């Protein structure tokens, strides 16, 4: 029975619904475990102290009565009690509730007269009874100069209700954060494995898994990789076959020109030799993608000495400056081909080659300088393209097919290094080769 694979849309919707349900559950638990705190309560004595300037209430002065006197509800009771405590005359103390009354008002239009004296006394006794408190209210007391002192209880920002809400938010965030991280990991992990599979040789479909979209992308990547591999193999086979077929007429031409005498014979043999070199370069370039090589520790300075010695034996002006060992890990034949191509390029286009091998930090650096005119700044990178030659004359006597630098860069990159070209301030061009160094065991 095949395992059902969900899409990213379904997974994202599931994680969202789970998060919402989790938040609602946490809120419900908080509501049960922490009941709604009772509202703040104040007494008539606290209002009396506030009028006297104590208790931290807010105070202000008003030229006119700030509001009407209370005539019903708790505000009327508090007003009666505060009048008695302050020893004020009726009408000089007014109270207004700051919270809506729970009992609907039954006041009728036109009934705004103060209650009788006996009712006032009863209400005052109620207000001053032990333990009697009221919902927050605002009080106004008339002074002897005719102005009104208005006191309002201060309300802290962090009220019990807000503390309860903050607690619910923190608990929900603490519970929801792991779920969010786990869900994000489930959604992104297949694409991370897809990126890793794209850099390796393993089939992406076998290691990606995850959602339908990720598996579809892995299948498309495997199909694309297979098509590219077939195309590269077909290209290599075709070009190798063409190069092989060209050797047969070249061999016949060589046999025919062997019977010639004088200058025509030497020129023809030289042309055939150059054509054979071009074919060899083409084969090296085509087969370079498939050449894995044998990587082993080697001394780049010693390899450079061998390359320079061969150049000197051919009568070319090539020098070397290298002291001690400079160990790298790479394929000896491939690195030798790369250095030889770079030195040939310097000699052919820059009259001579000055080679130096040094260590810079953890890298081994090989510089190849020439005395030529240098390169145009916009061509320093373009010359590494296959079949790119700066000589417009296309004179094969001074160069090849434009594959030397391409082969060198490809070889060095396969060995973990790089090569760049730059112009020297003193004149001429410089090829800068960098390879990861190996620590000298004897040091």
Image: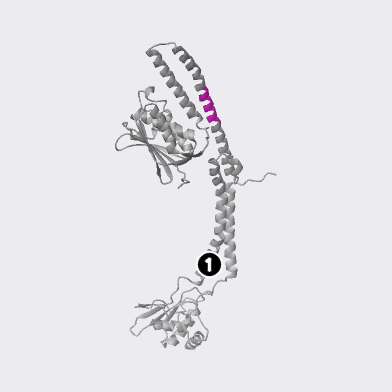
Residue 439, given in percent of the width and then of the height, sits at: 46, 46
Can you name the residue that lies furthest to the front here?
442
Residue 283, given in percent of the width and then of the height, sits at: 49, 26
The residue that appears at 51% across and 32% down in the rendered structure is 289
Q: Which residues are magenta?
A: 230-241
Give the number of callouts.
1
In this view, 107 is above or below 321: below
226 or 21: nearer the eye? 226
| Residue 248 magenta-highlighted | no
Q: How is the image coloured?
A: one colour
Q: Quickly name the residue at label 1.
A: 167
Can you name the residue that lies furthest to the left here?
426
In this view, 345 is above or below 206: above
Q: Which of the 4 image quarters holds residue 338?
A: top left
Can you name the residue that lies furthest to the right here?
1
Task: Sort mark 1 into few (<14), some (14-19) or many (20+) by Cα contacts within 10 Å.
Answer: some
Residue 96, given in percent of the width and then of the height, sits at: 45, 77
Q: Which of the 4 image quarters holds residue 393?
A: top left
14 or 387: nearer the eye? 387
Residue 295, given in percent of the width and then of the height, sits at: 51, 38
Task: Give the main secondary structure of the magenta stretch.
Answer: helix
**From the image, which quarter does the N terminus lie in?**
top right
The residue that appears at 44% across and 35% down in the rendered structure is 303
Q: Element type at marker 1?
A: helix
Residue 12 visible from this viewpoint: no
| Residue 232 magenta-highlighted | yes
276 or 129: nearer the eye? 276
Residue 189 visible from this viewpoint: yes
The residue that appears at 60% across and 69% down in the rendered structure is 32
335 or 183: nearer the eye? 335
């Amino acid at each position: 029975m095949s395992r059902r694979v969900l899409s990213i849309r379904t997974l994202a919707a599931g994680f969202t619904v789970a998060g919402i349900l989790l938040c609602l559950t946490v809120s419900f638990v908080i509501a049960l475990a922490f009941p709604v705190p009772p509202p703040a309560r104040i007494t008539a004595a606290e209002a009396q102290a506030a009028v006297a300037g104590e208790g931290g209430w807010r105070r202000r002065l008003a030229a006119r009565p700030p509001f009407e006197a209370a005539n019903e509800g708790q505000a009327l009771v508090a007003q009666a009690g505060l009048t008695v405590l302050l020893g004020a005359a009726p009408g000089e103390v007014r109270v207004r509730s700051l919270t809506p009354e729970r009992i609907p008002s039954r006041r009728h239009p036109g009934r705004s007269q103060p209650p009788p004296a006996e009712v006032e006394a009863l209400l005052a006794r109620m207000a001053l009874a032990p333990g009697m408190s009221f919902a927050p209210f605002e009080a106004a007391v008339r002074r002897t100069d005719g102005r009104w002192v208005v006191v309002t209880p201060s309300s802290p920002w962090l009220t019990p209700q807000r503390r309860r809400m903050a607690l619910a938010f923190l608990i929900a965030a603490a519970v929801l954060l792991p779920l969010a991280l786990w869900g994000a990991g489930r959604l992104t992990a297949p694409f991370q494995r897809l990126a890793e599979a794209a850099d390796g040789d393993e089939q992406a479909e076998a290691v990606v898994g995850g959602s339908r979209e990720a598996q579809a992308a892995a299948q498309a990547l495997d199909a694309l990789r297979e098509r590219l591999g077939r195309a590269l193999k077909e290209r290599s086979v075709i070009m190798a076959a063409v190069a092989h077929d060209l050797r047969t007429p070249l061999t016949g031409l060589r046999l025919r020109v062997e019977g010639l005498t004088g200058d025509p014979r030497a020129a023809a043999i030289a042309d055939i030799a150059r054509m054979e070199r071009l074919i060899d370069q083409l084969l090296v370039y085509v087969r370079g993608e498939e050449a894995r090589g044998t990587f082993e520790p080697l001394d780049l300075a010693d390899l450079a000495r061998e390359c320079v010695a061969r150049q000197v034996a051919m009568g070319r002006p090539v020098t070397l400056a290298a002291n001690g060992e400079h160990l790298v890990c790479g394929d000896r034949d491939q690195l030798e081909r790369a250095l030889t191509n770079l030195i040939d390029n310097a000699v052919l286009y820059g009259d001579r080659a000055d080679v130096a091998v040094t260590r810079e930090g953890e890298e081994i650096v090989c510089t190849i300088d020439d005395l030529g005119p240098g390169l145009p700044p916009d061509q320093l990178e373009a010359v590494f393209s296959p079949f790119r030659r700066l000589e417009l004359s296309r004179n094969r006597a001074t160069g090849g097919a434009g594959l030397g630098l391409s082969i060198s860069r490809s070889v060095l990159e396969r060995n973990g290094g790089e090569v760049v070209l730059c112009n020297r301030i003193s004149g001429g061009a410089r090829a800068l080769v960098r390879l990861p160094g190996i620590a000298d065991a004897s040091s």
